[in-house]
Image (spheres, rainbow, N blue to C red):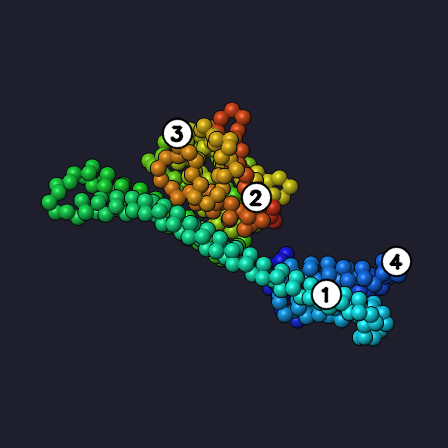
Amino acid sequence: MTRWLERISTPRQFGLGIAAVTTMVLISLAVEPWVGYQAVAFFLLVTVSVLALFLEIIPLVSIAILSAVLWDFLFIPPRFTFSVGTRQDQLLLLMYLLIVLIHSVLSFRIRQIQREVQKREERARDLKFYNALLNSLSHELRTPITTIMGASDNLLSTSNNLTETNRAELLNEINTASIRLNRQVENLLGMSRLEAGAVKIKKDWVDIHELIYTTLAQFEPNNHQHIIKVSASDSLPLFKLDFGLMEQALFNLVNNAIQHTPAGVTVLVHADCVDEKLLLAVSDTGPGFPTKEVEKAFDKFYRAKGARPGGTGLGLSIVRGFVEAHGGTVSLRNLPLSGAEFTISIPTEVTYLNRLKNE
């Protein structure tokens, strides 16, 4: 709320301050016969103190002076004049004006210091973010690039008498490293878009079956030893989603299950429609997440203890960002027997036109 008020224009700040002081003056006129005109000064001081939490220095000092003028004119005897009857009232008015001005200036200065501290903390967090990113990139990008360069040199070398089997193995290494490199670049670009607030949702009617099988087609059986299954009713409607963003989100979830579970584990992709919400779940039969780390799973650069080498820890945070951009949520829970389950829930428009076409 403070930041929002600080962004409004100076004239609007003046209007807000005048409205607040005027409201307190009207209340004070109603209660003054019972509390006395001296107590009105405390009411006005509280009002200016609250305004000091939000207003800039020029509107704030102006409103503080206005409150003193109104107290003098409307409440201090003789009323409805700018003269002050007694020396005691003169002293009270002078003290009120000094207190309210000093309080306003000090409150504004404290807010300035808080802003500076906050900016320094944000810069420190940004620096930590980029250091972590660079440290991660130094390994995650160098490894596939080194593999590609080494395999390419072997293929291009005229001194090596490579068999067809050797060539196929080297080409497969290049292909695997290229896929890994492309995945890391996509994750980095996705996180950059989220950090910059540049994610633009381009919704269109999406067939969930097409989304699932297009995503799973990117996982070549030769590159993993997992069993991937799909559970999705043929009667599912079309959902209005951004196909590209949801494809990357689903890819990251499936890839996370493959990367962090032992070979032979079953990964299940389940889709359903409940109350015009898309429910998309990715579960596995692996060991699951440590209970204390479930809440950290979607944090940037988070990697579970004992995780295999590789990965930047951005995949799940990108999933959350893309899902929230759709107005949805993503959650993680450990299954009762074994394994973990990620569930995406997105409220969206649905249509059953695809069913009519198939009938």
Q: Please, what secondary structure does the residue beneath circle 2 have? A: strand
Instruction: Please state which of the two labelled residues, at mark 3 or mark 4, is closer to the viewer.
Output: 4
Point out the tag, 3 or 1, that comes first from the N-terminus: 1
Q: Is residue 352 visible?
A: no
Q: Which residue lies at the image location 42% right of the left edge and 34% below the top edge?
A: 305
Q: Please, what secondary structure does the residue beneath circle 1 have? A: helix
Q: Is residue 318 visible?
A: yes
Compared with 289, 320 (above or below) is below
Which is nearer the eye, 85 or 136? Answer: 85
Q: Which residue lies at the image location 57% right of the left edge and 46% below the top edge?
A: 328
Which of the 4 image quadrants contains residue 308? top left
Q: Residues within 10 Å of mark 3 (few under 14, many from 20)?
A: some
x%, y% of residue 307?
39, 34
Q: Residues within 10 Å of mark 1 (few under 14, many from 20)?
A: few
Instruction: Please state which of the two labelled residues, at mark 4 or mark 2, is closer to the viewer.
Output: 4
Give the Cα separation between the discs numbered 1 and 2: 56 Å
Going by the numbered disc 4, the residue's amino acid type is Trp
Instruction: Please state which of the two labelled residues, at mark 1 or mark 2, is closer to the viewer.
Output: 1
Point out the tag, 4 or 2, that comes first from the N-terminus: 4
Q: Please, what secondary structure does the residue beneath circle 3 have? A: loop
Q: Which residue lies at the image location 16% right of the left edge and 38% below the top edge?
A: 163
Going by the numbered disc 2, the residue's amino acid type is Thr
Provide the residue designation for mark 3. Answer: 262
Dot label at residue 34: 4
Provide the residue designation for mark 2. Answer: 329
Residue farthest to the front, as pictured:
87
Going by the numbered disc 3, the residue's amino acid type is Pro
Which is nearer the eye, 221 or 257? Answer: 257
* Placement of the C terminus among the 4 image quadrants: top right
